[in-house]
Structures are given as structure tokens and as C-alpha cells.
Image (cartoon, rainbow, N blue to C red):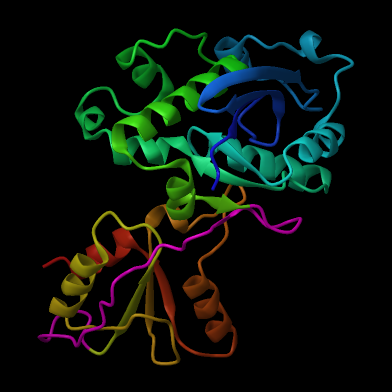
Amino acid sequence: MITDFIALDVETANADLASICSIGLVHFKGGEHFKSLTILVDPEDEFDPVNISIHGIRPEHVVGKPTMAKVFPVVGAALQDTAIVHHSPFDRTALWRAAEKYGTNGLPCVWLDNLQVARRTWDRFKLDGGYGLANLAQAFRYEFRHHDAAEDARIAGLLLLKAIADGGVTLQQWIDNLGYASQSPGVPPKRMKPVAYPKIARKGDGDGPLLGETITFTGRLSMSRDMAATQAAIAGADVADSVSKRTTVLVVGDQDLRFTNGEEKSTKHRRAEELIAKGFSIKIVGESDFLAMTAS
């Protein structure tokens, strides 16, 4: 049963998530803030004025500081099999991208995105400022220096403890449901409990513009899979749960069409590309294009 954890936050020199210039680590032990550590890092990259205006770290501050190639082995040894809490996918992805940049191992730990915990614990912030650190800290009267890596990590940890107290869900339960596990070098952390989508297979109904097509959906859609399947069926298409040789159209969530920051294509997407390479006629389209095709 996991009870203790390390809260983590990173700052970057520019828009490239691999350009980490600061890491904040805050150890929570027995439900309390135990100790903090800030590591300045030479990103071996340019500093964007916009990023400097956010966190205040300038090129002269990192002169002589270690690169991530040297930081990873030291930090990784200390975080072996630890639960790492972060607020938003930004930090987890940045560390994986930095590991990819330097061809080194990432952090051997389990990751928990506290942003997802907060969204599932406090509904009221949907319409009251959102789930950013600053808004949540203000709501719960936590004082901190925003965009200081260790301070942001500390608040992320305090918010997790608050969510555990308010929601009655343990740290172990959150990890079991939302956790990501580090993978082998070169592979980004993977969700430990894959998202399970309900079966949506159905026959086409009518003679709409997609009559004769067999459609499968993948990725993050703006609507539920069931609603998308209904719309496809009304347009005449058969809907299948998985990609096969009968598939003629794969609809991909718009934000998953282009893969950046280390994200991978889904299993369905890769399977469709394999079949296309073998000569099968499958069109891969985004959700917006799918909606345009089914518009009456």
C-alpha cells in the first residue's frame, strides 16, 4: 500500500519540453511535507523570453549546472519504485522527452497526475476558475510562489492530500485507477489501467452518405463513443469495435492525428496503417472530417 510520495514539477527554457532548466522535488512522508529540493539544470538550449518571464530563470543562472544526462542517474536512484505526483501531463512528458533527448533512462517510478485527481474530486471548479495550481491554491488558501518548481511541487502534494481527505480515496486507489508506469528506455510512461471503452458495434441504419463503409473509432473524441457510433450508423455505416480487414474508415480524435511531445499512435491507428501497407483500402480521418461527412 503506497502512502508516501514525491511531488515533482519542472520548468523549461522554451516551448520544447525537453529543455528542462529546473526540477523541484518535495518529499511527503506520513501525510506531511518532509523535505524539498530544487535542482537547476543546464538545458543546453536557448531560453525563450516568454519562459524567462514566467519562471525567472535566465541563462546565467544555469552556467556550470549539470545537464539532464547527469541529473537522471542521480535522481533516478533516489526515486527507484517511488510514486511521483505531478500536476498535468506536462511534467511527466517533459522528463520523458529529456530522457529521449539524451538517450538515457527516465525515472523508474509510478506517475500520478494530480490534475486528474482534482477534476474527479471537486466538481465545483469546472465553472469556477478551473483546475490550475494557482486557482486551487487560492481556493484552499495555500500560499506559494507560482512557477518556482519546488513550490509548485509542494502545492501539488498538498492538493493531493486535500483530495484524499475530501474524497475518501486513498493514494493507492488513485494510482491503481489513474497511474502511469515508467517503461523501457525510449518508450513513454503507459497508463497502468487502460481506458476501457464500451462495445459500440452496430449495423448501419439508412442510406446516408456513409452507406457501405465500416467505421472504427480511436483516440479522444469530443463526444462519447456511443454518440459517434450512432451518428455513423444514421449515416449508413456499420460500426466495428476494432480494426480489421473489413474496416474502411478509421476516425481518430483530432488532437491525436498529430503526435507530439512523445505521444504514440493508438493500437488501432497502428493496425490500420499496417493493413494499408498491405494494400487494404482504409481511410484515416479526423473527427472534424468525420462530422463534416455525416452532416445532413
Nearer-the-camera pick, 226 or 137: 137
Q: Which residues are magenta?
A: 182-211
Q: Is residue 184 magenta?
A: yes
50 vs 114: above or below: above
Taken as a whole, is the magenta stretch helix, strand or loop? Answer: loop
Residue 148 in the image: state x and y as whole percent: 59, 14
Location of residue 47 (image quadrant) = top right
Residue 222 placement, left or right of 179: left
Quarter of the image for the C terminus: give it: bottom left
For the point 50% across and 27% down, the residue is 31
Most extreme residue toward the right is 64
Confirm whether residue 40 shows in the render: yes
Nearer-the-camera pick, 219 or 87: 87
For the point 74% across and 56% down, the residue is 186
Residue 27 placement, left or right of 60: left
Residue 286 placement, left or right of 205: right
Q: Is residue 111 magenta?
A: no
175 vs 125: above or below: below
Residue 120 in the image: state x and y as whole percent: 31, 41
Residue 118 in the image: state x and y as whole percent: 36, 34
Residue 260 in the image: state x and y as whole percent: 57, 49
Count of marks placed on residues: 0
Location of residue 98 (image quadrant) = top right
For the point 64% across and 38% down, the residue is 94
Confirm whether residue 149 shows in the render: no
For the point 22% across and 73% down, the residue is 229
Location of residue 209 (image quadrant) = bottom left
